[in-house]
Image: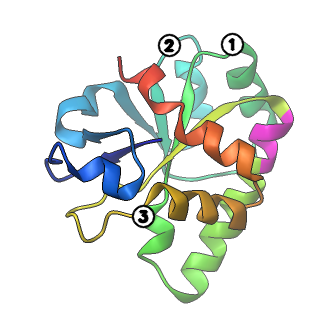
Amino acid sequence: MFNIVVFPPEKNDSPDHGYEKLYEYSKIKNKIVTAKNLGEAANYKNKKILIALEDYAFDEGAIKIIAEKKKSCFLIDLSKIINSYGTPRAIRMARLRIFLKLCVKYGAYYTFVDFAKDEFELRSARELMHICLLLGLNLGQAKFALKMLPHYLQ
């Protein structure tokens, strides 16, 4: 299990939270691309890169295009769900649930991170897997998603 954090992780931090390795965002931010929507993300379909989406729109065609190349991976920031409340959280979870259903249907790769700002915000790997279960994934899909990160950060 792997995660990306904003603070510099200590060597002995990861075993306590169930991670094999914590990546510091400032050291790997050049391997992450931010796209406004799936149409813009389709431009990166031939690159081995992590794509962070701002809006999880329902564009099956773009997901199909990205999924068929099997190169890029969607980076899903769970801190936006964890740190929000009420209606915005419900809307974000509903959109993400539909997006993940389409990713599973077409075989697009995805991974989850929480971008913790300090060690007290860091969620355990097990907790991230349980949030994935709330989003409609099964335990095997959640574990696989949390193990995808090092393949794109090498």
> Does residue 5 appear in this view?
no
Q: 29 and 36: which one is in front?
A: 29
Whether tag 1 and tag 3 are in contact, CB under 8 A, the answer is no
- Percent across and percent down for residue 140 are 73, 44
Q: Which residue is drawn at 26% across and 30% down?
A: 28
N-terminal label among 3 and 2: 2
Give the extent of the magenta segment: 101-105
* Relative to 19, 64 lies left or right: right
Residue type at tag 2? Lys
Measure how far apart labels 2 and 1 are at the Cα level.
9 Å
- 78 vs 3, left or right, is right
In front of the other: 61 or 83: 83
Q: What residue lies at 73% left-to-right and 59% top-to-bottom?
A: 97
Report the residue at 80% width, 49% height from top. 101
Residue 88 falls in which quadrant of the image?
Answer: bottom right
**Residue denoted by label 3:** 79
